[in-house]
Image: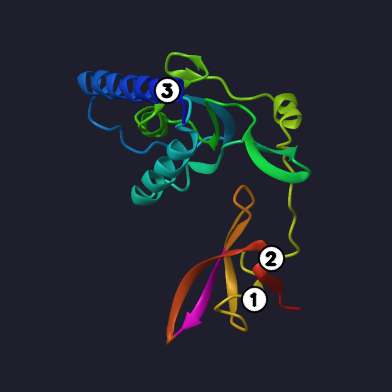
């Protein structure tokens, strides 16, 4: 690593530390959960080199605080870069938008707070506390075409689990989440009715 790279790393660390100190001064009680809205893709600005850490830390926070119903996908856009050196072909992954992370989420006061206070995040693309979602055209240009998935079963239908640990179990559909492409099925396990969440591809309708 060159001296310039070391200096850049030091500057990035100092910037993040300054940001955290600033956040600490303005920190307020975390807002409560709010009613749901429509999930959209948003662009989050981060310090350069912190994209993957922001993604990992945000995913942990979402899981720990049980906010999966408000966050649907977090992406650090990457592309393959092929380099041929000394006759050897080498493929590397390169960030498409350095300093940015894409988040598909439902914006509420709390979900905004969670993202904004993740270490390494400088803010949403937008004005102040009003982030601007990506348009359908921008999503298509980035390769994030939204493909609607349809299934041949509905709520209260009987389905059978066709793969995974519960393969062979039969249950009743309780909920279908097309955003996450998951289905909640009530199955009988050890003499008790237990709700389990499965991928669309893990179940099939019992005819």
Residue 103 appears left or right of 87: left
**Residue 47 in sight in this render:** no
Residues drawn in magenta: 184-189
Q: Residues within 10 Å of mark 1 (few under 14, many from 20)?
A: some
Specify which label sits upstream in the sequence, 3 or 2: 3
Which numbered dot is residue 77? Answer: none
Residue lying at the far bottom in this picture: please name it.
Answer: 191
Front residue of 174/196: it is 196
Q: Please, is residue 83 above or below residue 182 in the view?
A: above
CB under 8 Å between callouts 3 and 2?
A: no
Which numbered dot is residue 201? Answer: 2
Q: Quadrant of the C terminus?
A: bottom right
Q: Name the element at disc 2.
A: helix
Front residue of 8/106: it is 8
Q: Name the element at disc 1.
A: loop
Q: Residues within 10 Å of mark 2 (few under 14, many from 20)?
A: few
Q: Tell which tag, 3 or 2, sits nearer the viewer.
A: 3
- Reading the image, the residue beneath label 1 is 163
Residue lying at the far right in this picture: please name it.
Answer: 87
Q: Tell which tag, 3 or 1, sits nearer the viewer.
A: 3
Residue lying at the far top in this picture: please name it.
Answer: 127
Please state the horizontal and vertical placement of residue 1, each as a whole percent of the image. 46, 31
Specify which label sits upstream in the sequence, 3 or 1: 3
Residue 185 lies in the magenta-colored region: yes
The secondary structure that most of the magenta stretch takes on is: strand
CB under 8 Å between callouts 2 and 1?
A: yes
Front residue of 49/104: it is 49
**Residue 50 in sight in this render:** yes
Q: CA distance from mark 2 to mark 1?
A: 8 Å
Which numbered dot is residue 3? Answer: 3
Q: CA distance from mark 3 to mark 2?
A: 51 Å
Q: Name the element at disc 3.
A: helix
């Amino acid at each position: 690593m060159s001296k310039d790279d070391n200096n850049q790393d030091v500057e990035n660390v100092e910037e993040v530390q300054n940001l955290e100190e600033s956040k600490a001064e303005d920190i307020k009680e975390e807002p409560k959960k709010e009613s749901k809205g429509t999930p959209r893709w948003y662009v989050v600005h981060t310090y350069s080199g912190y994209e993957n850490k922001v993604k990992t830390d945000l995913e942990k926070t979402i899981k720990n605080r049980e906010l999966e119903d408000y966050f649907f996908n977090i992406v650090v856009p990457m592309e393959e870069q092929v380099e041929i050196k000394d006759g050897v072909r080498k493929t590397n992954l390169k960030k498409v938008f350095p300093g940015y992370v894409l988040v598909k989420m439902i914006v509420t006061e709390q979900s905004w707070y969670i993202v904004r206070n993740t270490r390494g995040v400088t803010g949403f693309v937008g004005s102040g506390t009003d982030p601007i979602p990506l348009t359908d055209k921008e999503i298509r240009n980035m390769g994030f075409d939204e493909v609607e998935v349809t299934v041949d079963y509905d709520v209260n239908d009987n389905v059978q689990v066709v793969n995974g640990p519960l393969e062979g179990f039969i249950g009743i559909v309780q909920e279908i989440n097309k955003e996450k492409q998951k289905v909640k099925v009530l199955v009988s396990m050890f003499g008790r009715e237990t709700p389990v969440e499965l991928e669309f591809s893990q179940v099939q309708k019992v005819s």
